[in-house]
Amino acid sequence: MKLNDALRKAQTLGLDLVEVAPTANPPVCKIIDFGKFRYDISKHTKDKKPASSKLKEIKFRVNIDEHDYLTKIRHGEEFLDRGNKVRVQLQFRGREMAHQEFGMQLVEKVRDDLSSMSQVEMDPKITGRNITMTLAPLPANRRKRKFTAAPRPDEETENASTPLGG
């Protein structure tokens, strides 16, 4: 359709002639409401923006058991895998303040264990009775999980021993 014909048709309909693909040969145009077209484009670009990363927190104590530690590390990996930042907070209670080096060792261990998933955004810092450190996730293509949850042994035996015939 020729340009003049297309413009006349758009005016009779009360709409606008909008060039959609200017690089195409010949250029592609549509007869649409231009205000609505711009609104749809802005909404589409807004949807593409990634949601701002949230800050998740994991709290530790100095005398944490190995199993509890691994559970919290797995949660930290999960948060980082979803693109969230993680604040690691270690709390001292009572006489634990006398041995702050044990707390720093634990925070360093957390940093080393989560190093394949994150980078340190804020170094460990002692504030009052707490040690706080913030970890930011690595880009998705560089993340490698170390502590994935292994299936429980009792679940494996249940699945293997169930008869198929019923």
Image: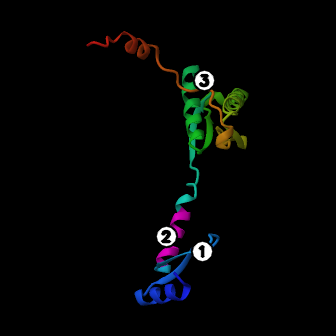
Q: Position of residue 159 (x, y in %)?
A: 39, 15
CB contact under 8 Å: marks 3 and 1: no
Q: Secondary structure under badge 1?
A: loop
**On residue 151, which mark appears?**
none
Q: Quick check: marks 2 and 3 in contact, CB under 8 Å?
A: no
Q: Which residue is mark 2?
A: 40
Range of magenta residues: 35-46
- The crowd level at tag 2 (other Cα within 10 Å; few <14, some 14-19, many 20+) is few
Measured in 3D between alpha carbons, the distance from the residue under mark 1 to the one under mark 2, in whole angstroms, is 21 Å
Compared with residue 91, is residue 160 higher up or lower down, i.e. above or below? above
Give the residue type that dot 2 points to: Asp
- Using a 10 Å C-alpha cutoff, classify the residue at mark 1 as few (fewer than 14 neighbours), some (14 to 19) or many (20 or more): few
The Cα atoms of the two marked residues, 3 and 1, are separated by 70 Å
Taking the spot 62% from the left edge, 73% from the top edge, the residue there is 22
Horizontal placement of 119 versus 157: left or right? right
Q: Secondary structure at mark 3?
A: loop
Q: Which residue is mark 1?
A: 27
**Tag 1: amino acid:** Pro
Q: Which residue is mark 3?
A: 63
Vertical placement of residue 39 versus 49, above or below: below
* Residue shown at 46% from the left, 14% from the top: 153
**Alpha carbon distance from label 2 to label 3:** 55 Å
Q: Closer to the N terminus: mark 1 or mark 2? A: 1
Tell me: 124 left or right of 149. Answer: right
Kind of residue indicated by mark 3: Asn
- Asked if residue 38 lies in the magenta stretch, the reply is yes
In front here: 78 or 20? 20
